Amino acid sequence: MTFQKARRTLKTALKMALPYGLVRAVQTSRERDQLIAELDRLTGHMSDLERSVVTLEADRQERNETRRQQQVMAEVAAAEEAARLVIERETFSRNEIVVDGKRIRSRAEAPLIDLQIDGYGHTIRIDHPTGPGTLHVITQPGTSGCRLEFGAKNQIFTNVFVSFFQSGGNFARQSAVQIGKDNLFNGNVHILAGVCPSTLVEIGDQNLFADNIQIRAAVEHLTYNVETMARESVEHGIRIHNRVWLCNEAMIYNRSEIASDNVVAARTLTNRPFTESNTVIAGVPAKVKKRGVMWHLNTTDDYLTAVGPLRSADF
């Protein structure tokens, strides 16, 4: 007899020897344990499913809330843009802004020029500059009746800022900036108009501007004589004639005049007239350092046959 057959015979003999109820009880206990184990498994599975459902519902609600917020933000942005356009049109309508001979009524009509316009009664006439840089025109709220003329064939490589601001407690009123033609703006140039009526910043033709040039006509704070109580800081404007080379970080302040065919050296500060031509002006305060000098854009021998100092520039 094999082992398996002996085992079956012994199992049959035990069943016959044990009472039926005891055998059934053992079987029932096993079945109950199996059912409990299966129930525990199913319960765990249901818990996992419930957690998954909760997570999915939270994700759905979060997505819905995100979409709702995005929609609200888009609606707010659209409303703000619509309000901005209304204000912009109204602002442009109370100022005369002409680009390339055409009056414009929004920034979108001159996308390559940064027009930050406020105030009223301004006259701004611009011939579109060439080059990769940007012309920025800024008139602060409260300014009135100011004038900007920006001539033809001016080339900007970086930025030119023309600003009509508040200064010394006064807003710019009826002051002017006139910029001629064929000027080359190599770097950042900041032009701050005067605040007093009739104050003029005048820049001629074929001038060369290096980087970080400051041209400031506004008197920012008052100085006066303590005995006579007379004002000493009075705006007299600025005039830069033709074919002037302003080197890096030159500072041209109120009362300055630079005659034609001059060089203003780097980091020079001028605050008085220089009416002599063919000089090098340098220092703080500025003085004539050298006479009998002219300049040219290129360092080659082009100057020997040049019509002007910017003749080789791509205007």
Image (cartoon, rainbow, N blue to C red):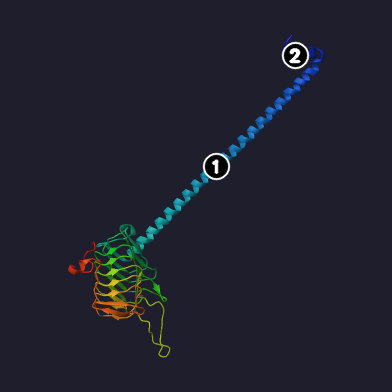
**Numbered circle sitting on residue 292:** none
Disc with the residue nearer the chain's start (1 vs 2): 2
x and y percent of residue 225 in the render?
A: 41, 87
Which residue carries the number 1 mark?
59
Q: Amino acid at mark 1?
A: Asp
* Foreground pick, 86 / 50: 50
Q: Amino acid at mark 2?
A: Arg
Q: CA distance from mark 1 to mark 2?
A: 60 Å
* Side of 83 relative to 155 (left or right): right
Can you tell which quarter of the image residue 213 is in? Answer: bottom left
Other-residue count near label 2 (Cα within 10 Å), few / some / many at <14 / 14–19 / ≥20: few
Q: Check the image and name the residue furthest to the bottom.
A: 227
x and y percentages locating residue 235 in the rendered image = 34, 79
Q: Quadrant of residue 139?
A: bottom left
Q: Decide if residue 204 is on the left or right side of residue 138.
A: left
Q: Could you tell me residue 180's position as x and y percent?
A: 25, 69
Q: Secondary structure at mark 2?
A: helix
Compared with residue 224, is residue 64 higher up or lower down, i.e. above or below?
A: above
Quarter residue 114 falls in: bottom left
Residue 300 in view of the camera: yes
Mark 2, residue position: 7
Asked if residue 198 can be seen in this view, the reply is no
Question: On the rendered structure, is 54 left or right of 140?
Answer: right
At mark 1, the secondary structure is helix
Compared with 221, 205 (above or below) is above
Q: Residue furthest top?
A: 1
| Front residue (pair 185, 254) | 185
Mark 1: few/some/many CA within 10 Å (<14, 14-19, 20+): few
